């Protein structure tokens, strides 16, 4: 693998060259979120904010409000008093597994080749510093040209999205106090996704119009401890293992939500395989379609049912010690139509009554934002579709239900149109690097992202 760590791939005079340099710089600053505030490196977040201010001085000369602890709200005044828009990204990242075999240092910001092309490598390139840099580059270059948007534009940069922190709710409270009612809000989420749907070769420009609920559940089994030489039957570790195995086998209801039906309708001309003859009969064949999608892979299964992921396990500290307590962490992603109470009740019925269920954190599925169909055109969604078509003409734009939780769910309190879309091309392999090893973004798609945000800002009639 070759590396281009000193020479710019397209020349330093390229109008968007600053995006590549800025992303490399901010990736090198490890702004890691933790639920334990004492573990957070506040100085790293301050360095990041300083770096952004130095690289994007015109954007930071706008009306900037600091949202504690390390978030920003920026108002770019428009020409009219039409309802504003909000563009969002978050500046924090998830930790890196110390044992994970990264090809490039996770906080190196290397500019190096990958199978898909020349990339900026590192934690946060896709989630979500790439979006922040693309937004700021678009704003900065438009300000340099003397452009003023048709309506106010707000930029909201969060600092603790990865731990469901309070920066986004604080930003919403600030906007509410200032009487801001956005036309629409746009956060991270969907992408120009290839290899995302069975039988579809065209990339899909998926725009999240809703997101699944996210609930953190801890299962706890207690019992008498002791020495490993004299184990009692059915101890805490065994009961936790049995509970995890039971939930792994648990059959949860499947359904095709309305946004997914629209997704299928838009993909129908591109579909092959077993889904093709079923899409036109989605109402009568919903259960069969859901079954096919559930069996097609993890990504498609997640769009038709609530999912349970087993994330943490703990018991004794020593291998010759019988634990008095064993625990398992479960992350439930709840499909619209289900509720937290529904899923907790199903878990309760599936496992031993002696295993405790502690709901650590709970968020219900979001409301569904308006989107366009063959019968109805929503102007905000239509604008997003149009810009997708301009910058990514090979993509099929469509609404969908986002699997992950974002800061944008808090903005549903002040806005009826909350969308989730990152204007970057992502293959299945690239999507798999998010929160994992070798996260990276191609230079080409980063620059496409800058162009996408510029076009959006220039078309805010």
Image (cartoon, rainbow, N blue to C red):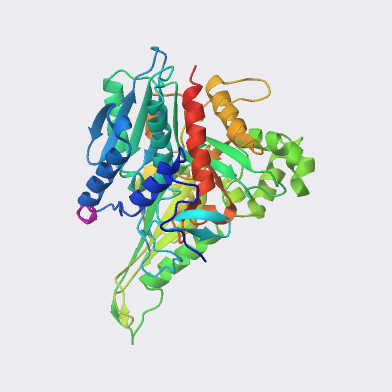
Would residue 359 be seen by someone viewing this image from the given angle? no
Examine the rendered structure and indicate whether residue 259 appears above or below residue 327: above
Q: Nearer the viewer, residue 44 or 17?
A: 17
Q: Residue at x 43, y 33 (%)?
A: 138
Examine the rendered structure and indicate whether residue 284 appears above or below residue 181: below
Which percent across, then down, holds residue 217?
38, 53
**Number of residue marks:** 0
Q: Furthest-bottom residue in view? A: 229
Q: Say whether residue 102 is left or right of residue 204.
A: left
Q: Quadrant of residue 370?
A: top right
Q: Quadrant of residue 318?
A: bottom left
Q: Quadrant of residue 168?
A: top left
Q: Nearer the viewer, residue 126 or 244?
A: 126
Q: Residue at x 63, y 55 (%)?
A: 297
Q: Nearer the viewer, residue 374 or 240?
A: 374
Q: Nearer the viewer, residue 445 or 231?
A: 445
Judge whether residue 40 is colored magenta: yes
Would residue 74 be seen by someone viewing this image from the given angle? yes
Q: Main SS of the magenta segment?
A: helix
Q: Residue at x 34, y 33 (%)?
A: 156
Q: Say whether residue 294 is left or right of residue 100.
A: right
Q: Say whether residue 252 is left or right of residue 31.
A: right
Which percent across, then down, holds residue 254?
61, 45
Judge whether residue 125 is colored magenta: no
For the magenta stretch, what is the residue range?
37-41
Which percent across, then down, holds residue 418?
46, 29
Which percent across, then down, holds residue 277?
80, 41
Q: Say whether residue 103 is left or right of residue 173.
A: right
Q: Residue at x 24, y 51 (%)?
A: 44
């Amino acid at each position: 693998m070759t590396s281009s760590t000193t020479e710019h791939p397209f020349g330093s005079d390229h109008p968007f060259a600053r995006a590549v340099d800025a992303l490399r710089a901010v990736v090198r600053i490890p702004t890691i979120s933790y639920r334990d505030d004492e573990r957070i490196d506040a100085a790293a977040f301050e360095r990041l904010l300083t770096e952004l201010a130095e690289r994007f001085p015109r954007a930071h000369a706008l009306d900037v409000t600091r949202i504690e602890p390390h978030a920003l709200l920026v108002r770019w005044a428009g020409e009219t008093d039409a309802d504003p828009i909000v563009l969002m990204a978050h500046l924090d990242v998830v930790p890196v597994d110390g044992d994970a075999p990264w090809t490039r240092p996770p906080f190196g910001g290397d500019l190096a080749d990958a199978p898909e092309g020349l990339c900026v490598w590192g934690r946060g390139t896709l989630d979500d510093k790439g979006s922040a840099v693309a937004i700021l580059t678009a704003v900065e270059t438009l300000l340099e040209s003397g452009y003023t948007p048709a309506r106010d534009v707000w930029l909201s940069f969060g600092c603790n999205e990865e731990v469901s922190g309070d920066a986004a709710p604080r930003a919403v409270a600030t906007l509410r106090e200032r009487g801001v009612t956005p036309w629409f809000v746009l956060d991270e989420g969907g992408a120009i996704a290839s290899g995302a749907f069975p039988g579809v070769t065209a990339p899909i420009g998926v725009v999240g119009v809703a997101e699944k609920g996210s609930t953190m559940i801890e299962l706890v089994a207690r019992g008498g401890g002791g020495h490993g030489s004299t184990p009692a039957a059915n101890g805490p570790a065994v009961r936790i293992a049995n509970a995890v195995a039971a939930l792994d086998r648990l059959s949860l209801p499947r359904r095709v939500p309305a946004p997914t039906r629209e997704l299928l309708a838009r993909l129908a001309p591109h579909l092959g395989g077993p889904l093709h003859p079923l899409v036109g009969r989605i109402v009568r064949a919903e259960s069969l379609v859901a079954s096919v999608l559930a069996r097609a892979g993890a990504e498609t299964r997640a769009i038709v049912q609530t999912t349970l992921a087993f994330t943490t396990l703990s018991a004794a500290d020593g291998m010759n010690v019988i634990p008095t307590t064993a625990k398992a962490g479960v992350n439930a992603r709840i499909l619209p139509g289900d509720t937290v109470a529904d899923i907790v009740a199903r878990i309760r019925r599936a496992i031993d009554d002696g295993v405790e269920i502690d709901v650590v954190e709970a968020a219900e599925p979001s409301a569904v934002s308006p989107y366009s169909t063959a019968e109805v055109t929503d102007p905000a969604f239509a604008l997003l579709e149009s810009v997708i078509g301009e910058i990514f003409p090979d993509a099929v734009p469509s609404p969908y239900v986002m699997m992950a939780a974002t800061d944008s769910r808090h903005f549903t309190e002040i806005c009826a149109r909350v969308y989730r879309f990152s204007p970057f091309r992502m293959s299945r392999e690239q999507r798999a690097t998010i929160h994992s090893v070798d996260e990276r973004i191609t230079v080409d798609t980063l620059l496409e992202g800058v162009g996408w945000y510029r076009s959006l800002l220039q078309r805010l009639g």
